[in-house]
Structures are given as structure tokens and as C-alpha cells.
Image: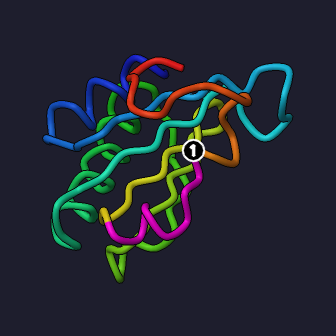
Amino acid sequence: MLEAVLASVDDDKAEDIVQIDLRGRSDVADYMVICSGRSSRQVAAISEKLADRLKQTFGVSAKMEGKETGDWVLIDTGDVIVHVFRPEVRDFYQLEKMWLPAGQVVGARTL
């Protein structure tokens, strides 16, 4: 599932893709993926295409919130939580800082 999520957002030209391993740190999901779209329209498109691909490939109906505004879309696939942001909104909330282990650098694709 994680590889399918990463491939989908990459195919749709998401930027600054970060993968965070949550195993052993949270019961919510195994992984978190955070990425950015350049505009509200791109954020919504990345999210919608991801949800469609997951449904076609895995039969998973992902829960999605925030698509209407396109500033920050949360997609819950069960094992992988995906956050798709506009860059300004991502900078404001800084989720990577909250979830990355201390001392780990943001900017690497696999963390």
C-alpha cells in the first residue's frame, strides 16, 4: 500500500514527498506520507487520483477530508495516512517536526 501511495503522488507531480515510519510509535497507522501540491486545484487532484487508484488496485475506500478547500487534504487508507498540502499551509503546521524522531532531517524521501 505504501509503495502505491508514493507512486501515485509522485506520478501526479506532488512535491517534497516525505515518508515517516510510525510503526511502534502510533496505533493510528504504520506510515505517514506528507507532500505538497502547487495549488488548491493540484492538491485536490492529487488526493482524488490517489483515492481512485487505491480503490481500483486494493478495493480500499479511503476516507478523505478537506478536498473541498484544497488547502490540506487528509487521506486515511488504514495503514497509511496521507497529508497533501499547499506549501504555505504545510509550512504553517509543520507536521514533519511533530512526527520525525529528534535530530532527523526533513527533506529526505524515506525517513
The colour scheme is rainbow
- Residue 88 image position (x, y, % from top left): 34, 70
Residue at the image position 65 percent from the left and 30 percent from the top: 79
Give the x, y percent position of residue 44. 27, 65
Up/down of 77 relative to 30, above or below: below
Secondary structure character of the magenta stretch overall: helix
Which is more toward the observer, 60 or 21?
21
With respect to residue 90, does 89 lie above or below? below
Secondary structure under badge 1?
A: helix
Residue at 49% in and 45% down: 82
Residue range corresponding to the magenta coloring: 88-96
* Residue 5 covered by magenta stretch: no
Q: Is residue 56 above or below residue 44?
A: above
* Quarter holding residue 63: bottom right
At label 1, counting other C-alpha atoms closer than 10 Å, the crowd grade (few under 14, some 14-19, many 20 or more) is many
Task: Give the residue number, with chain letter if any, for mark 1.
Answer: 96
Which residue: 59% across, 53% down?
95
Task: Give percent across and percent down for residue 27.
Answer: 85, 35
Please identify the quadrant where the C terminus is shown. top right
Residue 72: image quadrant is bottom left
The total number of labels drawn is: 1
* Residue displayed at 62% across by 46% down: 97
Q: In this view, does 34 lie to the left or right of 97?
A: left
Nearest the viewer among 51 and 34 is 34
The picture quadrant where one finds residue 41 is bottom left
Image location of residue 77, percent across then percent down: 57, 40
Instruction: Please name the amino acid that badge 1 sits on.
Output: Glu
> Which residue reaches farthest front?
103
Q: Does the magenta stretch include residue 90?
A: yes
Furthest residue toward bottom? 69
